[in-house]
Image: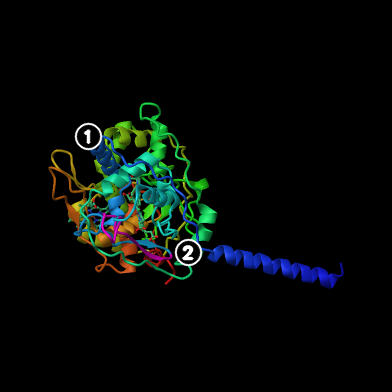
Amino acid sequence: MTPISALRWLCGALVLCLLGLVGWLFWPAPTMAVPERQADTASPMAMTATIERGRYLSVLGNCQGCHSLPGQAPYAGGTPIATPYGTVFGPNLTPSAQGLGGWSAGDFWRALHHGQAPDGRWLNPAFPYTHTTHIGRDDSDSLFAYLQTLLPNETPNRPNEMRWPYNTQAALKVWRALYFTPGQPSAAVTVQANEIERGRQLVEGLAHCSACHTPRDRLGGLISAKALSGATMPNGWYAPSLLDPQEAGVQGWALNDVVHLLRDGKSGHHTAIGPMAEVVAQSLQHWNEADLHAVAHYLIALPRQSSAPPKQASQAVTNRALGQRVYEQHCATCHGDQGQGFLLADGRVAYPPLAGNRAVTLATPANLLRIVQEGGFGLPKAGHPHPFGMPPFQMTLDDNTMAALLTYIRESWGNTGTVVQPLDIHQLNNPHGR
Ligand code: HEC
Ligand code: HEC
Ligand code: HEC
């Protein structure tokens, strides 16, 4: 072969490859074949049990949290989910023409297991089908049976607002090729047989704890080698490492303390805040004892791994006297002049202590900043319907004052957190460099 003809041959091969790639990208996805199963003609009693099982599974998976808006009909959709590439809206799951009205149990399984809509459209992985893919067909059918008993609601779905090219089916195709393998539903283990394995299935599967607590790469794929080691969420909150006892790890804890943390959102005197408070309120507080125990056993048995050492901050910029002044003016009435918080006579926490609180001294001050900016309410619970609240300080404090205040809290009363600079506040408020 002469050099020229070799070059021609190479160019030809390249063009063919390119054409092949483009063809693959834009070729409509075939709809995954799924077995339709015999409709359940069992007794009404068995049907009631299936629906109740489905309802409980929807609580484990917190389906409602992403498919409802506060104050609107449950499962009517419209829920905004922030991603680094734009906003996706949880669709209507009620049995109406706008929702899952015309769906079969097989269509539903295709969505949960393969991440594909009945018309062949690939779904956006903001829907954690990377996790629901691990649940079994029976559980999927139960969930579907339950959703079909909801009141039909005609709210139309809101189109997703993703930036190009992330809004294309071609992009989802590439993403799936890189990051998605449909689960091999493991035989559902009974709690008695193996609690830790059942806990792992919940954390990685239906309860999708890893969707928040596992870091993602630049394209939003979960980095499985760093599973559960802590991750910054698109909304700026940091889901701390479940491997590091300095962060959210519970290795070495008593089982009951972990169950208390999961069910009531309380650890020591720390209260779950932000997105974790929502997980507790919408999901964990309604779990049954056996599943709470399974997850607690799994979390306790996770390997310990310390997170990256906090960066060494320079000492110069932050004004400690200012921090103390602001704390005394705005915070001490509730959290105490020594950061000791305020407990009620029966031992319940009215205002959480900030001294010795690991949520306060995390390497990143992201969550500390968010709670001070946004304020919050403890969980409304039976017998305590009006929890104590904290006002938002978003408008009151500029970056400089905020940095001084957070530094003061992180360094006082025996706390050993790092200094927070005004630039840190600016960056945490503008995560995409805008
Ligand atoms: C973290 C948020 C989140 C959670 C939790 C979640 N979903 Fe979704 N779900 C979404 C989003 C967002 C979409 C839309 C994806 C898209 O538009 O491509 C979706 C889509 C779906 C669809 C496809 C609907 C359609 O019209 O195409 C089904 C079915 C579904 N979810 C069921 C469930 C069930 C069942 C659960 C609980 C086990 C659940 N989801 C939990 C966010 C979530
Ligand atoms: C009116 C009383 C009140 C004031 C004033 C107040 N807080 Fe709070 N704070 C609370 C309550 C109640 C909670 C628990 C909120 C929750 O569970 O969401 C809380 C939670 C917190 C937390 C999270 C603690 C944890 O364990 O997760 C931090 C940090 C915090 N406050 C800091 C501050 C700072 C800094 C100020 C002053 C700028 C302040 N608070 C002012 C009542 C108050
Ligand atoms: C929507 C995102 C999200 C999901 C889902 C989620 N977490 Fe979290 N989690 C967070 C954030 C953010 C924090 C930090 C806020 C805080 O300290 O309360 C946190 C904190 C924690 C903590 C530390 C609490 C403390 O008091 O020290 C534990 C333990 C934890 N999560 C376990 C879990 C488990 C188990 C699941 C699954 C059942 C789960 N999380 C699901 C976001 C999430």
Considering every residue shown, the one lying at the far right of the view is 2
Q: Where are the magenta residues, as a range?
A: 85-100
4 lies left or right of 266: right
| Lower sequence index among marks 1 and 2 | 1
Looking at numbered disc 1 in the image, what kind of residue is underneath it?
Met
Write down the residue under mark 2: 169
Q: Is residue 366 above or below residue 250?
A: below
Residue occupying the point 44% across, 58% down: 120
Mark 2 C-beta to ligand 1 under 8 Å:
no
Majority secondary structure in the magenta region: loop
Is the residue under label 2 in contact with that under label 1 (CB below 8 Å)? no
Q: Residue 127 carries which label?
A: none
Number of other residues with Cα within 10 Å of mark 2, as a class: few under 14, some 14 to 19, many 20 or more: some
Residue 374, horizontal then vertical, whole percent: 26, 61
Quick one: quadrant of the C terminus? bottom left
Residue occupying the point 15% across, 43% down: 382
Residue 175, horizontal then vertical, whole percent: 51, 58
Write down the residue under mark 1: 45
Number of other residues with Cα within 10 Å of mark 1, as a class: few under 14, some 14 to 19, many 20 or more: few
